[in-house]
Image (cartoon, grey):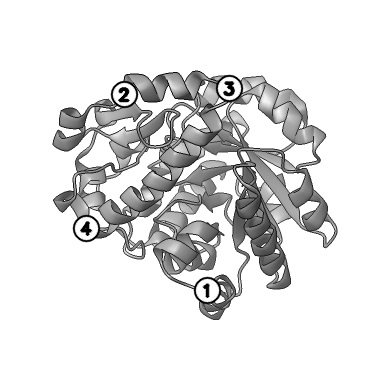
Amino acid sequence: MSRLDTVFTRQAGIEVPIICGAMYPCSNLELIAAVSAAGGIGVVQPISLIFAHKTDLREGLRKIRSITPNPIGFNAIVEKSSSIYEDRMRKWVDIALEEGIRFFVTALGNPRWVVEKVHAVGGIVYHDVTERKWAERALESGVDGLICVNNRAGGHAGKLSPEALYQSLATLGVPLICAGGIGGDQEFVKALELGYAGVQLGTRFIATDECTAHNDYKQAILRAQEKDIVLTDKISGVPVSIIKTADVEKMGVKAGFIARQLLKNPRTKHYMRMVYSLRSIWQLKKSNRDGLGYKDYFQAGKSVATISKVEPAGTIVRRFAEAAAELGQ
């Protein structure tokens, strides 16, 4: 059996066990389509598609379909931040299902309602987790697999290494996807050797021809090393991995005293996280568009260490696949 033939590839109906992770604001439709066309699976981030790229969701999904007939995924953030947001997400999930999407990635809440909708039409749901207790809760809600976010990931990183996280979750009996720290083909192969059924890449796919992120962002990824990845709680109220630029050093990475107290208070922490999230959506969109001319943050993971050039997304997927296939011979 080929290393590329895993439970995940069979479930998702794809050839290469690589997910282009959902990213705000970097998940543009051309990038999603390019990864899927090459045999992996690109995941639509609806907030990014609608608000950052000014694309109607249904029209965007159909545009991707016009580029490739291969499977694509959909990201549903299920945190109960407000009834308005939850209503929007339910409508977006319905549109995705109507347009034929059958692979969903959920995060930040109870995915049960997504699972019920998706399973009703024969689809599958994977859920983002950083440790076993969240994995067990997700499985109680009926998810089919887990996106295992480790301490090398960009965005909201976990605390465990890829190896430790796998060992913690391996006995749960569902496919596990390694998310974090994979920028080169050898890291991809290593993840499969550990037992992961696939990988999720974010930072690596920002530095691609198809991604519409500002060139300053892509060049920052190419220049950065592991030591340049730092955590800040000033974006969403919880630690987020970013590149330490000169501006980040000036601004610092810690939330102010009052903000920290509000984030600790059970009555105010959800409000503060919502404020941070709304602000970060605007800030990340602006830095993505305007580059270093706007003093802000570039999210990235420790995979920057093995990313050396901007190249087509399909080239990355095929190179990774060839490396795994060669090792399996």
Q: Secondary structure at mark 4?
A: helix
- The disc, 2 or 4, on the residue closer to the chain's N-terminal end is 2
Check disc 4 and report the residue beneath it: 290
- N-term-proximal mark, 2 vs 3: 2
- Marks 2 and 1 sit apart, C-alpha to C-alpha, by 36 Å
Instruction: Give the residue type that dot 3 points to.
Output: Pro
The circle on residue 56 is 1
Residue 309 in view, yes or no: no
Name the residue that disc number 3 marks.
Answer: 266
* Mark 3 surroundings within 10 Å by alpha-carbon count, few (fewer than 14), some (14 through 19), many (20 or more): few
Q: Residue at x 58, y 25 (%)?
A: 267
Q: Is residue 299 left or right of residue 145?
A: left
> Is the C-beta separation of discs 2 and 1 under 8 Å?
no
* Proximity of marks 2 and 4: CB atoms separated by less than 8 Å: no
Amino acid residing under circle 2:
Lys
Q: Nearer the viewer, mark 3 or mark 1?
A: 3
Q: Position of residue 107 (x, y in %)?
A: 61, 41
Q: Is residue 82 shown left or right of residue 191?
A: right
Is residue 123 toward the left or the right of residue 16 in the image? Answer: right
Amino acid type, residue under disc 1 in the picture: Asp
Q: Position of residue 280 (x, y in %)?
A: 38, 45
Labels 1 and 4 touching (C-beta < 8 A): no
Q: Residue at x 26, y 52 (%)?
A: 287
- Which numbered disc flags the more N-terminal residue, 2 or 1? 1
Residue under circle 2?
A: 254
Q: Nearer the viewer, mark 2 or mark 4?
A: 2
SS state under label 3: loop
